[in-house]
Image: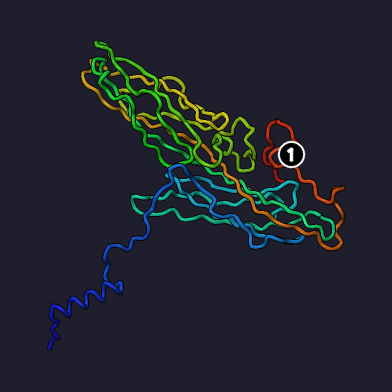
Amino acid sequence: MKAQLNAPAMLVLGLVLVASGCIDTGGGEGPEVTVQQESGVTIQSFETQRSEVREGDSIRPRMVVKNEGGRAAQNAKALLYNYPSVWSSDDGTNAVLDFGNIRAPDPDRNRPSPPARDDATIQVNSDYRQGQNVPVDVKAVLVYDYDTIADTGVIVAPRTLAPEVDSSPEVDNTAGPVQMDVVSEAVISVPEDETQASTQVCLEVENAGGGTPLLPSVYDSGIRSVPLSNINENVNAMEVTAEINSEIVSVSGENPKTIRLYDGTATTRCWDLQANVGQNINRQTTERVSFVSEYAYRDKDSIGLSITGREGSPDTSDSTGGVQEPDVENPTGEEAESPSIPAPPQ
């Protein structure tokens, strides 16, 4: 004999199941995934479990990074360094953390970008006076390949319609530390009884992130070639290409262009666009244009350590009792070209 449940009993049972989580109500998808419009790969943490060590001890710096922008990051690495060489990795060179390629978050699928982690073992190997306590920074430069895409449109119209055309194009940037905007009219006005015309479309490029863009070629030869300071012609620079998916509009002249950001301010460069309509045009069309900015991006962080000389260590301090450490950014103190990270010792 089957048991019968009346309507009130079934209602109570349903409420119990919902309250206990046994019925999927559609609300368990987790937090909303978003991108940070002016961000790429960011350092989430850079730390070591030991902040006070003795000469000859080993430490294990660990870095966690995350891609918060709109494009995948390629070849993300961090170089650990400090001068003079108060520590080294197991093989005697500057330690490198390798995060590989890091995909971007996907808000459409509500799929976040997972954090990437790596660590390295380094050893304090300089000699300090017995019992001397010296503060030292373990510095890191994070570098990765990235790009930003700015989608917009150029209007092609007969000259009789051109005055009626809204010439201020909308620009849709992917999220990234480099951002772009069209700051000119984007209309190609074709004279009556002619089939060709041209215009200039001008693009403003700025570094909106907290790090520094580099020409991609700087990073091609590896992280040890990346300059540490901004006094370098390849720093605060990127390559921008105009890509047009159109049968009637093309780029005339230099493309791609190398764009340099002087004094960290936005820079404007212009592209010559030409329309060849092939016949008299009697209506306006919008042709899609994408400006693709390619760059390596550099960010920095550091960990403060306190190193104490062991018993019997020789005295290598200066007359004031402290160890002389040159400025990493400009060890000579001159306004010359900045040093690049030196090659590993042979």
Classed neighbour count for the residue bearing mark 1: other residues with Cα under 10 Å, few (<14), some (14–19), many (≥20) = few
With respect to residue 206, does 222 lie above or below? below
Q: Residue at x 67, y 62 (%)?
A: 50
Query: Element type at marker 1?
Result: loop
Residue 312: image x %, image y %? Answer: 87, 61
Q: Is residue 127 left or right of residue 343?
A: right
**x and y, in percent, of residue 130 in the image:** 84, 59
Q: At 75% from the left edge and 47% from the top edge, which residue is drawn?
A: 84
Q: Quadrant of the N terminus?
A: bottom left
- Give the residue number, with chain letter if any, for mark 1: 331
User: Callout 1, which amino acid?
Assistant: Pro
**Residue at the limit of the structure toward the top, as seen here:** 193
Q: Residue furthest front?
A: 320
Residue 244 percent across, percent down from the top left: 36, 29
Q: Is residue 75 left or right of residue 338?
A: left
Q: Nearer the viewer, residue 195 or 42?
A: 42
Colour logic: rainbow
Residue 217, above or below 99:
above
Q: Position of residue 209 (x, y in %)?
A: 51, 41
- Which residue is located at x 40 percent, y 28 percent? 182
